[in-house]
Amino acid sequence: MITVDGSNFSIVYYKLLHLATNSEEGITSSRNGLVKDLGTAFFEISPQDEFRIPILRGRAFNPFFALTEFSWLIEGSNMLEPLNYFIRNYFQYSDDGETLNGAYGHRLRKFHGVDQIDKAIENLTKYSDTRRVVLSMWSASDLGSLSKDIPCNISIMLKVRDDSLDMTVVNRSNDLYLGVPYNVVVFYLLQCFLASKTGFKVGKQKHFTDSLHLYTKHFDKVQRIVDENNISSIKDTINKYDKVKTSTFINVDHQEVLDRNYESLAPPYKDLFVSYQKFKEVGLNEEVMNLLPKNLLGHSGYLWYSHFSNSKS
């Protein structure tokens, strides 16, 4: 089993990508094409990392989408439109053109007839020593379903250890290139939200997957990421910019984010999203880049814009 841990997610993610490129696992077929299935994997990020957005050159991670996905989750939404604004082909996962069947927030807050997030807060507050707080995103109705959107992350286990709230996300099948980094950001913010509501510190973030995999169509992209980065360069980038605690994002008005009323947000999130809004209106130009906040969060946006610019050149 693959096991990776560390105090910075960008480095943990780089190590996972490096392991995948060097793995001798064979190529097999799957529903979505040829794939290298790396098997079971466990990775853990310690609380020292208060950013969690990957800043690897060449990865083209979309921080605008990732933060909006958390707002979408915490509001319990299953509507397609807020996510399709950032990723134009996201509709391919919708069964009806309007909603997403596997929406994590909807599954946690509404799908099972109980608000599991509120219930978790209630139980952890009353019984800090409980080991029974398990949130379910999987349903028996998913077994054999032909839906285009079935949850990959199926459950979340929450435990208080040393006055800190640990989170373990259990995943049935995890795309290392596309899925892992977004999962980490979104579930980290959920962990921060739950910790803030229960009065505990943020503990370890752990992910266990039964099938960590990499599609052959992404091999070249991942190899370029591995070649363009190393642990030393990642640390240099982190130290170069003013730090941002993305946990502060849990305090914004998330409905305003979903409604794209970005001017109502406080910096640095206002600056980040207004930059993207301008990008959608006029395309990539110097004004768009200059709107980005001058910190590590802004740099993550810069990396995404830079990749977009290079792909168009």
Image (tube, rainbow, N blue to C red):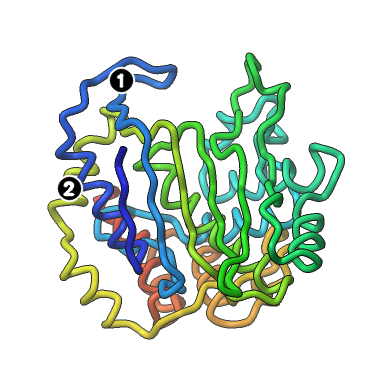
Instruction: Write the residue at 53% across / 80% down.
Output: 268
Quick one: label 1, few (<14), some, or many (20+) residues within 10 Å? some
The picture quadrant where one finds residue 256 is bottom right
- Residue annotated with mark 2: 224
- Residue annotated with mark 1: 34
- Between 140 and 278, the one lying in front of the other is 140
Label 2 or label 1, whichever lies nearer to me, is 1
Question: Residue 35 at x, y = what percent?
Answer: 31, 24
The picture quadrant where one finds residue 249 is bottom right
- Between 14 and 3, the one lying in front of the other is 3
Instruction: Write the residue at 27% across / 82% down.
Output: 240
SS class, disc 2: helix
Specify the amino acid type for callout 1: Leu
Instruction: Write the residue at 50% across / 32% down.
Output: 172
Instruction: Write the residue at 62% across / 59% down.
Output: 159
Say above or below: 30 vs 161: above
Spatial separation of the CA atoms under disc 2 and disc 1 = 20 Å
Question: Residue 156 at x, y = what percent?
Answer: 61, 47
Quick one: label 2, few (<14), some, or many (20+) residues within 10 Å? few
Q: Is residue 248 left or right of residue 228?
A: right
Say above or below: 105 vs 112: below
Question: Residue 72 at x, y = what percent?
Answer: 67, 53
Q: Quadrant of the N terminus?
A: top left
- Between 284 and 212, the one lying in front of the other is 212
| Number of disc labels | 2
Specify the amino acid type for callout 2: Arg
SS class, disc 1: loop
